[in-house]
């Protein structure tokens, strides 16, 4: 029995069913999905690390951390993934891990980074990501099993110009597998108006847009984001009655990350997670991981957590996995092909 099956939060049977289910991942940050073993290995080579190795190991291994500690950890991860080689490697590893977890389609998001001191531009950063994807397909015997698209993230620390630069890059790479734009980063930093022109630009040029909203209590911003009508929204943990009604009326699909929200205390417990309230009304929801490397999770584990916390039957879990096809940023014909592939895989399992 593998480690994840023995999690006290669900039964081994629930995990085994969820592992075998073909799944779609729509909210995974590349650097947050780094393997903990790779974080430890690369941090040994780091000179002048912002925190000591034992401290880093403690941070990686602890099961609960505040959002502030998460962003501290991202800063450390970013210090060890400054080279093109590291970015290429973690991209390949993330795809290997997803494929092994029966993820059949992923929209992987990442913030393109310019690091002049490393000879890295946003373009060369993305070239390294594309090389990592190519490496995965070159080595994998399961190449047909996982399809991947990229979403380029705007970090809330970025200026309007920096954000627009990323939006232009995303539009240029539309035919190379970039499906959309994401707004993420520390939710306590920056102002929505700063990045909106970049998101408008992406939308006007045919890209889809997803934003992190309501990860912390910020009702004015959350209302403005909802009024802008993104194609999907991540998190939405902190809502009042008015915002909840606005969201339900909008029918905008929600990317929900149970472990991430419980771990960072954005919601108090699995049972209290807003997944249940939205799912039971028929609002479109998709289970996602956020940062497998930071929250020690996998998509199968997230499905198993939902199964246990909300009493979801195998039939309901299957419907949940299949429904995610409609929320992807794929073209309708591609969505049909993906649904057929998943239905065929589910038939084989039965
Ligand atoms: C907001 C998050 C996040 O882009 O360097 N990120 N932003 N809320 C979260 N909830 C925990 N988890 C990850 O991946 C890491 C970056 O993704 C965003 C942050 O900006 C983080 O620095 P990339 O590949």
Image (cartoon, rainbow, N blue to C red):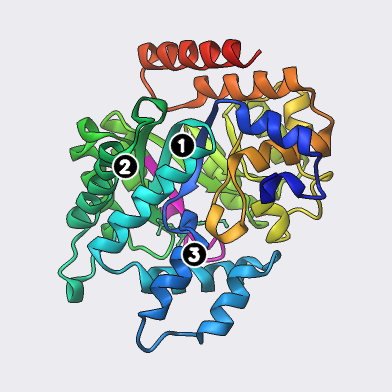
Residue 247: x %, y % from top left: 65, 33
155 w.r.t. 77: above or below: above
Mark 1 beta carbon near ligand 1 (under 8 Å):
no
- Please check the rendered image and state whether residue 251 is part of the magenta-colored stretch, yes or no: no
Mark 2 falls on what kind of element? Answer: helix
Residue nearest the observer in this picture, 243 or 304: 304
| Alpha carbon separation for disc pair 3 and 2 | 18 Å
Residue that numbered label 2 is attached to: 136
- Tag 1–tag 3 contact (CB < 8 Å): no
Which stretch did the figure color magenta? Answer: 181-193
Are the residues tagged 2 and 1 within 8 Å (C-beta)?
yes
Q: Which residue is drawn at 46% across and 27% down?
A: 328
Which label sits on residue 37? 3
Q: For numbered disc 1, what is the local secondary structure? A: helix
Q: In which quarter of the image is the N terminus?
A: top right
Q: What element carries label 3?
A: helix
Q: Residue at x 28, y 48 (%)?
A: 132
Q: Can residue 275 be seen in this view?
A: no
Judged left or right of residue 150, residue 55 is right
Q: Residue 99 carries which label?
A: 1
Residues under labels 2 and 1: Cα distance? 10 Å
Give 128 or 156, whichever is nearer the viewer. Answer: 128
In which quadrant will I find the C terminus?
top right
Q: Please give the name of the residue rendered at 68% of the width and 57% of the height, measured from the top-left corner.
A: 217
């Amino acid at each position: 029995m593998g480690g994840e099956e023995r999690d006290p939060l669900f039964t081994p049977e629930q995990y085994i069913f969820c592992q075998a289910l073909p799944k779609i991942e729509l909210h995974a940050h590349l650097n947050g999905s780094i393997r903990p073993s790779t974080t430890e290995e690369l941090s040994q080579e780091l000179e002048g690390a912002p925190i000591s190795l034992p401290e880093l190991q403690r941070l990686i291994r602890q099961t609960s951390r505040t959002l502030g500690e998460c962003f501290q950890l991202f800063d450390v991860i970013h210090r060890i993934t400054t080279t093109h080689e590291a970015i290429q490697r973690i991209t390949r590893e993330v795809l290997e891990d997803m494929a092994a977890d029966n993820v059949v389609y992923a929209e992987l998001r990442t913030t393109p980074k310019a690091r002049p001191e490393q000879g890295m531009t946003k373009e060369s950063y993305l070239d390294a990501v594309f090389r990592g994807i190519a490496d995965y397909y070159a080595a994998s015997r399961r190449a047909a099993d996982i399809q991947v698209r990229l979403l380029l993230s705007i970090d809330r620390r970025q200026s309007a110009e920096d954000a627009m630069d990323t939006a232009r890059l995303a539009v240029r790479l539309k035919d190379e597998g970039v499906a959309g734009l994401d707004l993420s980063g520390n939710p306590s930093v920056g102002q929505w108006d700063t990045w909106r022109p970049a998101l408008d630009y992406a939308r006007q040029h045919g890209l889809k847009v997803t934003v992190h909203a309501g990860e912390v209590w910020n009702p004015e911003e959350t209302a403005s984001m909802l009024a802008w009508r993104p194609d999907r929204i991540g998190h939405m943990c902190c809502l009042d009655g008015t915002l909840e009604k606005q969201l339900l009326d909008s029918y905008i699909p929600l990317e929900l990350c149970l472990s991430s929200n419980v771990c960072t205390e954005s919601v108090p417990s699995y049972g209290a997670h807003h997944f249940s309230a939205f799912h039971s009304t028929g609002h479109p929801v998709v289970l996602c991981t956020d940062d497998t490397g930071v929250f020690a999770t996998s998509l199968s584990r997230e499905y198993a957590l939902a199964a246990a916390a909300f009493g979801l039957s195998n039939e309901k879990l299957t419907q949940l996995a299949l429904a995610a096809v409609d929320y992807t940023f794929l073209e309708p014909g591609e969505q049909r092909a993906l649904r057929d592939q998943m239905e065929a895989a589910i038939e084989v399992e039965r």
